[in-house]
Image (cartoon, rainbow, N blue to C red):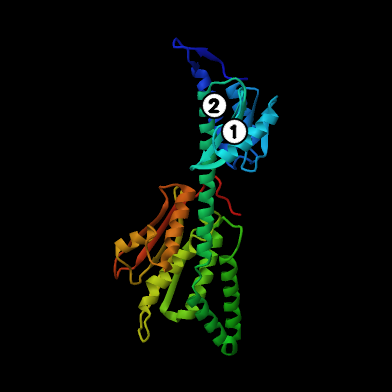
């Protein structure tokens, strides 16, 4: 039923307070139902809401193809088809009363056409058009954010260091004759490392799987770097099943080895370094730290890296930080503690339970 209205002393139409809540609910539903665009699956529900809200015969919406979806009964459907074509061609309002066709502009680009058949004030038509445009824009922004997150995940997958892969394969090859059993073990580790890093259609995983992946990576690095690299991994049993975004720990560990430890292992040096990875529960939060006693860095440089202004080979930290904030909110992300010559500690703190974060 249309929302009841009454005339104010000035003669304008207004909603009673109890009906304002219904209008707000309608606005929220529009945002959800039009998320996928003017040809999405939620369009019929959105059109029904608009028709009831405006109290008109019919409401229709068209995408850029000119295909029109209706809610209600319109005697002017042939005129509507013509009006939609006019709007798509001119990007301006068309139609003869009581039918009006309005261009839907999203980010200043034509996205479709809204058609209203019924006696209704032009101010209400413009307001309904603005609501639909806002809902379409919100959906487009959400889609863009999802694409950006997917692009960043692909970037992380592509970040597997060719230098590391070459060294790992060289070590494995050198052991084929001298220690075939060890060579076989490392080859299985290498295959597992590649499989996990390149896995597709995976948004979330478990702490257990992420720790297994970094154990595999560190086993390969120890084979390459020898006894110079020491590793300590500790994870509390109660957090092993916690769901976290896929591929958030491995880039942190890889960064600790590549940028923290390897610069210490210059040819002829006797340097020894340690990488420590810990995972534990703190109240309702999961806290994971990756710490190395390597060369460290200027805190201002670390800040620039998290802001996305670091060198090309440090993109992993910025990507992980953005992905964590995108999933959990602005309060979450990476904390980097470092100083030149004092090593680096990167801390991840996320909720142990979060809506929508489940292993895939």
Q: Which mark is residue 153?
A: none
Q: Residues within 10 Å of mark 1 (few under 14, many from 20)?
A: many
Q: Which mark is residue 114?
A: 1
Instruction: Classify the position of the C terminus by image quarter.
Output: bottom right
Name the image quarter holding residue 272: bottom left
Q: Is residue 186 above or below residue 326?
A: below
Tags 2 and 1 touching, CB below 8 Å:
no
Q: Is residue 329 above or below residue 236?
A: above
User: Is residue 244 in view?
Assistant: no
What is the CA distance from the residue labelled 2 to the residue labelled 1? 9 Å
Instruction: Classify the position of the N terminus by image quarter.
Output: top right
Toward the bottom, the furthest residue is: 177
User: Is residue 187 in view?
Assistant: yes
Q: Is residue 246 above or below residue 54?
A: below
Q: Residues within 10 Å of mark 2 (few under 14, many from 20)?
A: some
User: Label 1's element?
Assistant: strand
Looking at the rendered structure, the number of numbered marks drawn on it comes to 2
Toward the top, the furthest residue is: 9
Q: Which residue is drawn at the image coordinates 67% and 29% (left, top)?
A: 79
Q: Position of residue 126 (x, y in %)?
A: 51, 28
Side of 104 where 330 appears, left or right:
left
Comes first in the chain, label 2 or label 1 = 1
Q: Position of residue 204 (x, y in %)?
A: 56, 55
Q: Which residue is drawn at the image coordinates 38% and 58% (left, top)?
A: 306
According to the image, label 2 marks what residue? 125
User: Label 2's element?
Assistant: helix
Q: Which residue is drawn at the image coordinates 42% and 50% (left, top)?
A: 332
Q: Position of residue 161 (x, y in %)?
A: 49, 73
Q: Position of residue 265 (x, y in %)?
A: 38, 80
Q: Is residue 356 above or below residue 30?
A: below
């Amino acid at each position: 039923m249309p929302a009841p209205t009454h005339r104010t002393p000035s003669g304008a139409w207004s909603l009673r307070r109890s009906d304002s809540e219904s209008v707000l609910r309608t606005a929220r539903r529009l945002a959800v139902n039009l998320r996928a665009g003017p040809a999405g699956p939620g369009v019929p529900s959105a059109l029904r809401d608009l028709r009831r809200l405006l109290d008109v015969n019919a409401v229709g919406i068209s995408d850029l193809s000119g295909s029109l979806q209706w809610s209600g009964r319109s005697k002017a459907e042939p005129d509507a088809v013509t009006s939609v074509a006019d709007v798509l061609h001119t990007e301006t309002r068309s139609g003869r009363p009581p039918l009006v066709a309005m261009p839907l502009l999203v980010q200043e680009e034509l996205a479709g056409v809204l058609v209203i058949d019924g006696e209704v004030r032009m101010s209400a038509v413009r307001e309904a058009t603005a609501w639909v445009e806002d809902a379409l824009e919100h959906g487009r922004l959400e889609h863009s954010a999802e694409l950006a997150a997917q692009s960043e995940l692909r970037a992380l997958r592509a970040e597997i260091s060719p230098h590391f892969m070459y060294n790992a394969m060289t070590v494995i090859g050198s052991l084929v004759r001298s220690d075939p059993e060890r060579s076989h073990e490392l080859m299985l580790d290498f295959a597992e490392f590649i499989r996990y890093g390149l896995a597709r259609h995976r948004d979330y995983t478990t702490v257990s799987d992420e720790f297994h992946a970094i154990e595999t990576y560190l086993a390969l690095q120890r084979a390459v770097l020898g006894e110079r690299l020491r590793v300590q991994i500790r994870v509390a049993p109660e957090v092993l099943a916690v769901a976290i975004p896929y591929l958030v720990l491995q880039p942190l560990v890889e960064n600790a080895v590549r940028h923290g430890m390897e610069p210490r292992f210059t040819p002829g040096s006797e340097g020894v370094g340690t990488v420590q990875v810990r995972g534990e529960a703190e109240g309702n939060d999961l806290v994971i730290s990756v710490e190395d006693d390597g060369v460290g860095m200027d805190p201002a440089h670390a800040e620039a890296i998290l802001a996305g202004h670091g060198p090309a080979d440090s993109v992993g930290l910025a990507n992980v930080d953005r992905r964590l904030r995108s999933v959990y909110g602005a309060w979450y992300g990476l904390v980097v503690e470092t100083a030149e010559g004092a090593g680096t500690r990167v801390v991840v703190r996320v909720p142990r339970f979060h809506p929508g974060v489940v292993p895939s």
